[in-house]
Image (cartoon, rainbow, N blue to C red):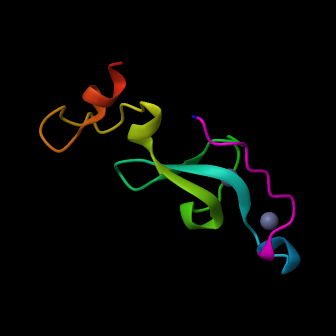
Amino acid sequence: MTEPALIIEVCVECEQDLEHCHGTAIVHFDGSADCAEDPGCRMAAEQHLFVIMCGEVECSCGDPQPAAGWPGEHAAAS
Ligand SMILES: [Zn+2]
Ligand SMILES: [Zn+2]
Ligand SMILES: [Zn+2]
């Protein structure tokens, strides 16, 4: 990634003392979410500042078919 690191120390939810996570949620094909920052994090995906699909981190859950409409294979080749 070429994006600069974005570190938010205090966000709106911090100020309101809401349960949330500053990490990135990885959403899997079955709808479950993992936290990329903290394996023990139990927050829902929407409680994270960032949400990505697990295909973006080469998770193989759900065994997605490398067929039309799933361009991961082409994007990986340089
Ligand atoms: Zn916060
Ligand atoms: Zn997955
Ligand atoms: Zn989290």
Q: Which residue lies furthest to the left in this view?
A: 68
Residue depicted at 43% across the width and 39% down the height: 56
Q: How far from the left and from the top, in percent, is residue 37?
A: 70, 42
Q: Is residue 35 left or right of residue 18?
A: left
Question: Number of marks in the image?
Answer: 0
Q: Residue furthest bottom?
A: 16
Dominant secondary structure, magenta = loop
Q: How far from the left and from the top, in percent, is residue 63?
A: 26, 33
Q: Is residue 72 left or right of residue 65?
A: right
Q: How far from the left and from the top, in percent, is residue 6?
A: 73, 50
- Name the foreground residue: 53 vs 78: 78
Q: Residue furthest top?
A: 78
- Vertical order, 6 against 49 (above or below): above
Asked whether 38 falls inside the magenta stretch, the response is no
Tell me the magenta residue range: 2-12
- Name the foreground residue: 57 vs 35: 57
Asked whether 5 falls inside the magenta stretch, the response is yes
Quadrant, the N terminus: top right
Residue 20, quarter of the rendered image: bottom right
Residue 15, quarter of the rendered image: bottom right
Residue 5, quarter of the rendered image: top right
Q: How far from the left and from the top, in percent, is residue 4?
A: 70, 42
Q: Is residue 74 left or right of residue 21?
A: left
Residue depicted at 12% across the width and 40% down the height: 68
